[in-house]
Amino acid sequence: MDVLAMRRQGMTYVEIADETGYHPATISKWVREGGPPAGRTVGDTDRVIDEKWSARLIELLVGNKDLLATSLFEIIAAEGFCGSYPTVARWVRSVRGPRFKRADQASVPIETGPGEEAQFDFADCSAWAQRVGLVPVLWCFGMILSWSRWRLWWFTTSTDRQHTFEGTVRFFEAVGGVPKISRTDRMGVLGQSQGRRFKLHPPALEFARHHGTEIRACQAGDAKRKGKVERPFRVLGESFLAELVVTGVPSDLDELNRQAQMWIDERAHRRIHRSTGVTPSQRFVAEHRFLGPLPP
């Protein structure tokens, strides 16, 4: 990676950033200083990731090349690794390079008040389930409180109306209340698009009335409006399901759902959320009193 040569060829800082995966400001600094800083030299005896752990990480990546640094760290930490997550992340970056390219434009988050909204959707996990020999068809129903980021995943084999209602009820019962708005896609099992409008079918209207929530569909093509449920689905595939391939695939859906809840409690609810600055569990304690009551 010779950023000075790229610059001499007439490439802009933004173009070099797109090519290398680093921020344009970092590229500008390197050009001013005559190139990237020299890598820190660490003796073999001082390395946290020594030959043993390096070999283990390479073994984990064989056949699971997209396994995230977070997952790799959790796996080897359980096996006795005493180093930090940043150490593993740097090792992974040195092997695979930066994970993301710079975004084309900044995204402004949409924030809602406590108890105001939950988002729900399904993620298709069938390809993973077929690859590991679990079931031919697998869906994950996901729902999340938009303010606290407290979430639920429920694996099932159908996305029909009854399973959509069941997943939603499971979430309401898990959080012990009902949000004012339940936001989702324009699901055909819930209603019908009429231009920009989305008209709910009578069963969906009755379900919403009975539980004291408003089912509100996003506008067509507005996936970012329910990004709080979509982002965890990426974590679902890149971390939770990918880790199961290494640690052991559950024998049935009941065990898969049990492990999913344990994973969420330990790896999501109890860890500081990068957007809110606190754990979802802590924020949920404050949000719970703003939720509506469960129906009798």
Image (cartoon, helix red, strand yellow):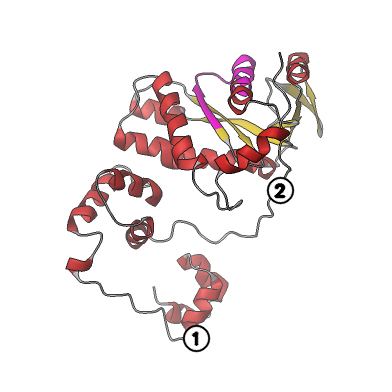
Res. 278 in view: yes
Residue 239 at x, y = what percent? 42, 41
In the image, residue 152 above or below residue 112: above
> Which quarter of the image is occupied by the C terminus?
top right
Instruction: Tell me: residue 222, above or below residue 160.
Output: below
Instruction: Report the residue at 55% width, 53% height from top.
Output: 274
Task: Judge left or right: residue 278 versus residue 5.
Answer: right
The picture places residue 253, in percent across and down from the top left corner, at 42, 20
Q: In the image, what residue type sits under mark 2? A: Ile
Q: Quadrant of residue 226?
A: top right
Nearer to the camera, 124 or 40: 40
Report whether 64 appears left or right of 280. left
- Residue 262 in the image: above or below residue 200: below
Q: Which of label 2 and label 1 is nearer to you?
A: 2
Q: Nearer the viewer, residue 107 or 4?
A: 107
Q: Which residue is mark 2?
A: 110
Q: Amino acid under label 1?
A: Arg
Task: Locate residue 215 relative to residue 63 in the image: left or right.
Answer: right
What element does badge 1 sit on? helix
Q: Quadrant of the N terminus?
A: bottom left
Tag 1: Cα neighbours inside 10 Å, few (<14), some, or many (≥20)?
Answer: few
Identify the residue under disc 1. 32
Q: Is residue 154 magenta?
A: yes
Residues 153 and 195: in front is 153
Which badge, 2 or 1, is on the more N-terminal residue?
1
Q: Which residues are magenta?
A: 152-169
Describe the element under mark 2 as helix, strand or loop: loop
Indicate whether 160 appears above or below 79.
above
Q: Could you tell me how many numbered marks the image carries?
A: 2
